[in-house]
Amino acid sequence: ITRILSAKDPMAPHNITRYSFKEFTYKLDPSVEQMSTHFEMEGNLLHNESEEGKKILAEKAAKEEARRRAAENESLGAGEGYHDDKPHRNQFNFSDRACQTAAPPMRDREIFTQPPPSISFGNTVTLCEVFDAYTEDLERQKIAKERAAVAAKISKNVQKTEEEEAEEESAQRDSMKDIDIVHSAEMQKSLKIMERLLNQNTYDEIAQDFRYWEDASDSFKEGEGTLLPLWKFWSERARRKHVTALCWNPQYHDLFAVGYGSYDFLKQSSGLICCFSLKNPSHPEYSFATESGVMCLDFHPTHASLLAVGCYDGTVMIYDIRSKTNKPLFQSTVKTGKHTDPVWQVMWQQEDLSKNPNFFSVSSDGRVTLWTMSKNELQHTDVMELKLAGIVSEEGEEHEEASLVGLAGGCCIDFNSKSEHLFVVGTEEGRIHKCSKAYNSQYLETYDGHYMAVYGVKWNNFHPRVFISASADWTVKLWDHTSKNALLSFDLGNAVGDVQWAPYSSTVFAAVTNDGKIHVFDLAENKHEPMCDQKVVRKSKLTHLCFNPKHPILIVGDDHGGVLCATFLRCLLPCPSSLSFLLPVFPSPHLSQVSQVFSQPQEDGSAEARGGDEERRSRGEEASSQEERRRRSR
């Protein structure tokens, strides 16, 4: 038998498994250590023939020679009187040196320049011109005083809360004089900074993916794309609550508010508002508790600290997130005309002529109400009462009994960005009504296309005539408000919770469904199939979504109280080579693009819509009894 010597160690293990912190799993380590050490000892021995060894031997010989000479001198009797007459070296190498240089001569330089050109100007002023100038100045001063008064009204309540907080802090300081520095405000600020630093290290990989991740397979995908999940936000106080509202802050693009309530109308509890930041996913920056469940919320577009909130019991409130107290600045009551049913949506509007902030609310009690912030309370004005539209018979006649039942329950509302007086309202009956602020006696138009409750309507950000709607009958429909029939219809295979237009494109929108999927469509690429159809949660129903106005990310909420942040990969973006869409977009190319999409023939889409109408009508009839029970429970 021939034996072959090799460098491999037969006793070395070949099945070493190590834990990978990057992939969060155990993986087999292919590298095997083949070297075996039998004896190892560290020492300080040097070879005599080496340079360092020779140097050490020479030093030892010199020391021995010095000892020998000292012993000889002592034996000869030199003793203490012995002196060495050998001259010493100048150990500092000192020397005196001097140098003389020539002084530079002084020189004066002058230059002559031409004087700058001057023009003589003169004018004649009349009394009329002086009067007009004074009148304009008085008008400017009057407007400035009005604006200052409005700002004082808003800041007055904030100052009150700040004064109360200052009194509380002073009382706490008086009672905590003997307490150590651990409970001081400086320590809290330092702990907050340390928490941010720790979270930055903990979520560094997610931040790197958000900035630089690119999927190499995107170059081979045509008409398809994927979403990359990033951060997950959750709070212990939101356990067993549903995410009922999402909204990004218009000034701080990393801050967003989440409303927690319950869509199970037989199991209602208290509500919660949490403001999360992308810089700290582990814990909310601000949180406010409410007595009733939160159903909707919205940030003010200019005053970024004001947050309007609608609750399940019909109350609307306004919070200042800068305030440390849990009390709202304004709150509607029965005396001030609060809603009698849940408030499903609130939307801020432009300030009125007196520069008072105001917002609209829509509720299941059939009222569309305008709320105005006055000095000490909220003033309400009912803009529209949603009358229940009659049921049309086979002969085309409308039953009069439907108008006597009551008002239609409003579920969602949105205002046209170009024509501010126009707005559309979605109802629980599946109808969409086009209304006007200036004409509240009846609807401008009614759109019949859905057979169950309409959960979301949104106007297009660039096209003034187009809006989109999402319903519980599994469909998302695209409308032109000048036509009663839907332009396009998309069946998503499950109840649709919310729909949103992308802020960077006029043809991209996204919707979420109860099966945990996010559907992203680009009508410029494909008008029938989604570019992305991705499941992001396992055992939860997605309820709402919201696009970030600046970054290519969106957030989605589910019925377990979780919020997921996901980013678009390059194939879903309109500008793959750059991120120019983050800059302000001019609507003219988008307007022409979406007009071109809608001007193309829609025969295929109409046929698909007609084919699915019967199935959706049957689903609507089956769910009608459930809708009636839900309305009675409220």
Image (cartoon, rainbow, N blue to C red):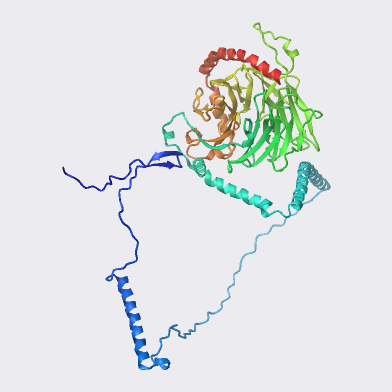
Image quarter of the N terminus: top left
Residue in the image at 33% along x and 48% along y: 33
Q: Tell me, yes or no, if residue 439 can be seen here.
A: no
Q: Tell me, yes or no, if residue 377 can be seen here.
A: yes
Residue in the image at 77% along x and 28% along y: 338
- Which percent across, then down, holds residue 507? 55, 29
- Which percent across, then down, holds residue 289? 70, 36
- Which percent across, then down, holds residue 252? 63, 42
Q: Residue furthest left?
A: 1
Q: In this image, 142 relative to 213: left or right?
A: right
Q: Residue furthest top?
A: 395
Q: Is residue 236 above or below residue 341?
A: below
- Which percent across, then down, holds residue 428? 66, 19
Q: Nearer the viewer, residue 531 or 195?
A: 195
Residue in the image at 47% along x and 85% along y: 97
Report which quarter residue 339 is drawn in.
Answer: top right
Total number of numbered discs in the rendering: 0
Q: Nearer the viewer, residue 345 or 98?
A: 345
Report which quarter residue 615 is drawn in.
Answer: top right
Image quarter of the C terminus: top right
Q: Residue furthest front?
A: 75
Q: In this image, 95 relative to 67: left or right?
A: right
Q: Nearer the viewer, residue 264 or 110?
A: 264
Residue in the image at 27% along x and 46% along y: 8
Q: Is residue 242 above or below residue 143?
A: above
